[in-house]
Image (spheres, rainbow, N blue to C red):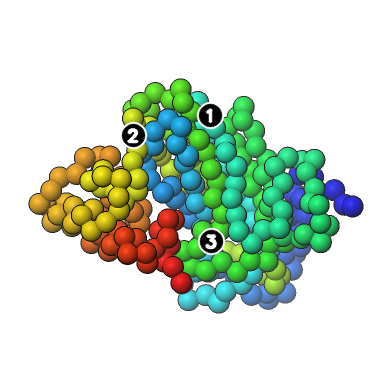
Amino acid sequence: MKRWGWKRICLTAVAGVAALFLLAGAALAVAVFTVDTSVRQTVYAPGDTVNVDVTLSPAEGEAAADLGGMQLALSYDAALFEYAGVSAENIDFIAAQASDEPSNPDNINSFLVAHDAGNGTVQLVYVNAALAPKAGETLFTVNFKVKESAELGAQGSFTIQSEGAYSTAAQLVAGTDLAKTLTVTVQESAGLLGDVNGDEKINSTDAVWVLQHAVGLRTLTDAQKSLADVNKDGNINSTDAVWILQRSVGLRDENWAVKE
């Protein structure tokens, strides 16, 4: 059985990217993706799990192309957070360390994580993923736990840097440049995203509070604002209220994605 160590996967990814650049002069088409990251809320309590979602979508007006490989570098505040693993769908195998290998040698869709707790870094590599992500779809989630020792009021950040991507159709990938920092605050109680009034339910009352805030009839606290901005666009408006209503009647799932 072939080994699926860190060096082998990195070399495979680098070789693939290098080959594409050598072929660039042969008039290959260029696949264009946009990559983004977000946290599901901006206020967390000690012991909570912070979910850093990574999305990769075909750029507007571009034809979809299968993703063949991608590499991201993520750094985090190790004084406040502990790395808690990666969750991803449509992946046969996730390697957590260099010695890991798939039990089934036919599992070619692989995802490798190299974590350095001392330096607060995580290297993430897709290899032969053959995925065709939809617009706005979460490609994978990097999870962190807020340390129990974290001081209330402390702010911590996650910085994500993309380091290249290529498609399975021998296409160079453009538009994947990303250098983004996400900041979260540690508070005594973060609450449930969408539960603006704090009654541990997500319902029409929360939507009304959001609308009232949007038109100046109610002033939300900073913690309530974090729970009200359910689509995480930095604004609290009628769109958030609609999402909350949709969630309350089962049209959106727990990750705020529209149910099909």
Please name whichever residue, 242 or 135, is drawn nearer the observer in this view of the structure: 242
SS class, disc 2 = loop
Name which residue type carries label 2: Ser
For the residues labelled 3 and 2, the Cα–Cα distance comes to: 31 Å
Q: Quick one: label 1 or label 3, which is nearer the N terminus? A: 3
Q: Earlier in the sequence, mark 1 or mark 2?
A: 1
Going 71% across and 58% down the picture, which residue do you hit? Answer: 92
- Which residue matches tag 2? 189
Is 27 left or right of 246, judged from the image as shown? right
Cβ–Cβ under 8 Å for marks 1 and 3: no
Which circle marks residue 56 in the picture? 3
In the image, what residue type sits under mark 1?
Ala
Q: Earlier in the sequence, mark 3 or mark 2?
A: 3
Residue 126 is tagged as none
Distance from Cα at disc 1 to Cα at disc 2? 21 Å
Q: Residues within 10 Å of mark 3 (few under 14, many from 20)?
A: many
